[in-house]
Amino acid sequence: MKPRAKLTPRLAFGLCGLGGMVWLGAAHAQSVAPSTTTLPSTTTLPSTTTLPSTTTLPSATTPPSTTTPPSAATTWSAANLPGANVYQDKFIDGGTLVPDVSKGDADTASDEGLARSLQIDGVVSALSSRGGGASTNLDENGIVAKSQWETVSYGAWSLDGSARAGGSGGPYEQGQGGSITLRERAMPFDGGWQADNALGDLNTPDIGLARLEPRFILPTSLMQGLTTEWRGPEDLQVVAGGGVPGLYNGIVVPDFQTLGGTTATAGAQWSPASHWTVGSQFIEAHDTNLAIGTAVDGDTRFSSNTELLTAAFKDGGERLDLNLVDGDISGKSNAVGGWADGSITQGRFQQSAGLFRIDPNLTWGNQLIANDMEGGYYRLDYQGRRWMTDIGIDEVHSVSGLGSDTTFLTGDAHYQLSRDWGVGSIANVSRTDGGTAWSLEGFVDHPNAWGAGRAQADFAKTQMGQDARLTLNQAWATPVGIRFSTSAYLEQFSGALANSVQQQDSTILGLGAVGGGQMTSKLGLEGNVNWAGAVQGRAAPGVSANVSLTYRLSYAWEILLTYYDSRTGSWTPPTVESPLSPPVPTTIPALDERGIFLTFRYKREAGSHFAPLGGGPGAGSGEIAGIVYLDANNNGQLDAGESGAPNITVLLDGRFSVQTDAAGRFHFPVVVTGHHIITVIPDNLPLPWILSNAGRAEIEVKTRDRTEINIGAQRPR
């Protein structure tokens, strides 16, 4: 492993340097020619531009043709028609509607030059934090700046930065006082090549085959450094990156905290033959801390080297993935892992299966992967017009003999009784050395006079206790542009509370609401509020809230008022999950944090917009807004009580990117009308959550319209 430890950083930084030289040359390039690209802003809170422009209605006073008048004595006009009133031009809604900036309706927006945008937030806050028996007053004041610009020959660029005073606490030390990231995407080169480069606070890159593993996930890691990715003919992809591992912190003003040490990676993949793709990647971490999980053998710092060899075959409904991992950690002997996954789709049936063996102490960079296990799994899915079913079995044994041997059975079914009624159920059984655990869930989906609802009952029993829960979710019928959903549940928990061996019986009542939209042409509201408290027995109350009011002062200026509250109870209901789920972060008692943020926002978009195929510069524009969220009940819609995923990168048409805010919200405020592709990059998605359809969604944007799309991540079964 020693030679590889030296080869990896040299190769990684060499490739990054090559990308950097091209990048620096691109920074000096300027153009005055109109672009054919729409540049969305990086605004993360909902815009207030949802209503049509102040276009005037056509006049009705033009007389009809008098080529052949009925008589010489008659003069036809709207003024002397019997009973007719002369129509007067009027402004829609008194002329107060928001302009369509792509048409040049706003005096402050220019459609000359290349597409570009700028947003600057000035944030002041008042925060309080309680934890560990102490009470602290905090502040998170600072500036957040986001900018994007298009070039003719050098791709799309973005610069995101923040400068912060104070901090929001948390389990880690305060960081560097802010963050900064410069990105370039889709820089074209001869021969069909494109390049993406980035510098600052970002994620380590992975080749495409490493990102698409169905069961064993090789996660990317946050770092402060630089990355490069090159894509060429025959699906050739080359990636490299290096820097100092770290973590994000902050609620509204992000701060980056380094973990010490270094990390570096380099890899490539290509398609040597029809239906086949092969690849390899190296990654190392030196003298750093784990991003998640506990220490390795009591050491808080470690070093590791890991190599991946992978191949994939895909032909119609047939797929096969082969993977081999070889690595060492902190001077230990080499550990080896291998797994094979395959699936066959025939009509409405899909069968998938896999075999695996992974030695203990395997990491990917400074993150743990599922290890110390061997076994196999099988899944059978059926999707019909009314039936959807899924059954599976996992058999997992410990390689070292120090872990548990587990047999896991799972099954779920959904049946559409009619157009309006659907029923479903999910059952899990886990048999381990310590005994048997099981869970059962049943639900009914139905529309009602107030919208659409779901009634759901859950029961779980493990060695630590048992839990029963009844939930009512309701998506309310609201006016266009307004969304509102509520949730209420009653839960009975019997078992040991966190940090306690004493058995407790508690009954918990929970309420939640999520929604938002444009209240008026100037006022917007977005919020997610949840409360839970014990109505019997002992259980610490839990409260979470993130509510924002946005008021548009003028075309370029907005003011935002945000209330934030995070108080976590001291109990965790038992769950029954697959043993193949990736490692999850070690539970850290949450601080009791609450506060108010006041944000003054300046934003400006200008330049010609992207012209889709068949379109032209100056086409109408709309906006795209949405939330990346954790779909806890796997029903495909955002329900009250389901949390957003922060710091997730969302791409528009593979070129323009924004990051989700603390509530998982993202926003592209000025987007050309037509067909667009939204792609969510799961780099910072918490494990074991995964995105369906590789995080890709296709949408249509209409002129002066707000297109909303919520993208949910689900737990693998």
Image (tube, rainbow, N blue to C red):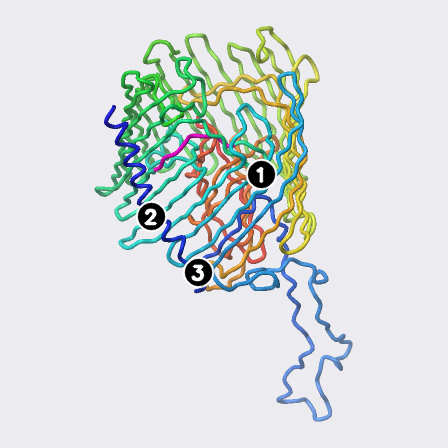
Outermost residue on the left side: it is 273
Tell me the element at label 3: loop
Q: Which residue is mark 2?
A: 21
Q: Is residue 361 left or right of residue 149?
A: left
Kindly report the distance in space between the C-alpha atoms of the residues bearing marks 3 and 1: 44 Å
The numbered dot on residue 351 is none
Q: Residue at x 46, y 58 (%)?
A: 610
Q: Which residues are magenta?
A: 241-248
**Which amino acid type is shown beneath numbered disc 3?**
Thr
The numbered dot on residue 36 is 3
Of 525 and 179, which appears nearest the observer? Answer: 179
Quadrant of res 483: top right
In percent of width and height, residue 402 lies at 37, 9
**Which amino acid type is shown beneath numbered disc 2?**
Met
Tell me the element at label 1: loop
Q: Are marks 3 and 2 in contact (CB under 8 Å)?
A: no
